[in-house]
Image (cartoon, rainbow, N blue to C red):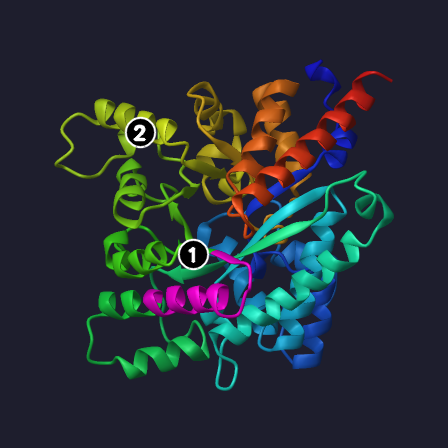
Amino acid sequence: MKNKITRELIEKLPKTDLHVHLDGSIRIGTLIELAKEAKVELPSYTEDGLRELVFKDNYNSLEEYLAGFGLTCGVMKNKEQLERIAYELAIDNQQEGVRYVEVRFAPQLHSRQNFDLIAVLHAVNDGLQKAKDEFNKRAEVVLEAEPPFEYGIIACAMRYFDEHFSTYFRSFINLHRYSDPDRVYALSSREVAQAAARAYHADGLPVVGVDLAGPEEGFAPHHHREAYEFAHRNFLQKTVHAGEAYGPESVFQAITELHADRIGHGTSLLNPKAIRDPEIKDPEDYVHDLVQYIANRRITLEICLTSNQQTNPVYRDLKKHPFGQMMDEKLSLTLCTDNRTISNTTVTDEILKAVTSFDLDMADLKNLLVYGFKRSFFAKSYSAKRAYVRRCMDYLEKITDDHFNT
């Protein structure tokens, strides 16, 4: 049966993407068009040229990987731009069978005078909502032959930033010029959490959670405890980029200090040799206990295979990626794109890589897909979420039955 899992089947199956950055997923054609309108300089004004120079299949360093964000953020400065980019991202997901997506981004990167954090969240929501409304008017959805499209928004705080990141960050730094830098980062994160909570509770936007992104080394998560405590008290869900560029203790800190419900990447989780804390005397036992803790609490890991390959040379041979070990440990996992444009990937690509590289069968694939729906930060009631997951799983069963029985 496992040899029958084809790309065509994967495209038809209902899927999720719980870890996808808006600024890393703009259509290249849209980037070119908006750059011309806004007079933003690009190294090339053709898709082939940008693929060759910026948005590559493989990168030589993390710095090279991140260079594209400087270009994309340059055309994400106003409501119209953000709404269009969000709308097109939703469409791109719908076209490959993704029925639920959680779009994350740092609104601070796009805010400016007279366009505050909540206005940025509204602009992105308008684009996603437009795409949702169009999709859910289709006869197949109205007649309940197929599940509808749903989405959530995750607001990212930053472990680190400087005055060159955005106009907002420049102003924020100037306003707190006599504060310790770590305190400035902490205050900024608290501001993001407060904006997210207000957008969710007061404005009714599906801002379902917060995230912490940026460099792990040298920027410990405990600085952002206040922001995450605020999010926790205001019933926002929490995810954290952790264990990608630091050891397993980074994952532990995200869970215990920031109440993380999910972990972005977590590639070092099972690697005792990655531990750097000298107070951890037995790395093997530490990793074992941490893995059991995560498994028992069904803390979900957002796995981004292609992105990890591109930023960590060790994973160029995908079989060396810890995803296989994570599957063996029966952890709660979901496959995500991270950045559709920067990584030149889709959810279908990520799933196909996992199937072919780790010899997954249909039972494995179904588990991965259901975790994506069940561990989503769904904005509606729990009963509505259960009904939606059931509808998506029934549709999955129909697609697989049709595929394997014809």
Q: Residues within 10 Å of mark 1 (few under 14, many from 20)?
A: many
What residue is shown with label 2? 293
Residue at 45% x, 80% y: name it: 167
Q: Quadrant of residue 103?
A: bottom right
Residue 363 % position (x, y): 62, 19
Relative placement, left or right, of 279 versus 204 is left
For the record, the magenta segment spans: 189-208
Provide the major secondary structure of the magenta segment.
helix
Residue reaching furthest bottom?
A: 114
Rendered view: 200 above or below 164: above
- In the foreground, 195 or 170: 195
Residue 61's x, y, as percent?
A: 46, 49
Q: Inspect this view and state whether residue 360 appears.
A: no
Q: Label 1 amino acid?
A: Val
Q: Is residue 405 visible?
A: yes
- Asked if the stretch drawn in magenta spans residue 205, the answer is yes
Picture coordinates of residue 325, whole percent (x, y): 44, 22
Earlier sequence position, callout 1 versus callout 2: 1
Image coordinates for residue 281, horizontal then vertical, percent: 13, 28
User: Residue 49 falls in which quadrant of the image?
Assistant: bottom right
Spatial CA distance of label 1 from label 2 is 22 Å
Q: In the rendered view of the protein, which quadrant contains the C terminus?
A: top right
Residue tagged by mark 1? 210
Query: Image check: 242 left or right of 313?
Result: left
- Depth check, front residue: 337 or 293: 293
- Name the residue type under label 2: Tyr
Q: Are marks 1 and 2 in contact (CB under 8 Å)?
A: no
Q: Secondary structure at mark 2?
A: helix
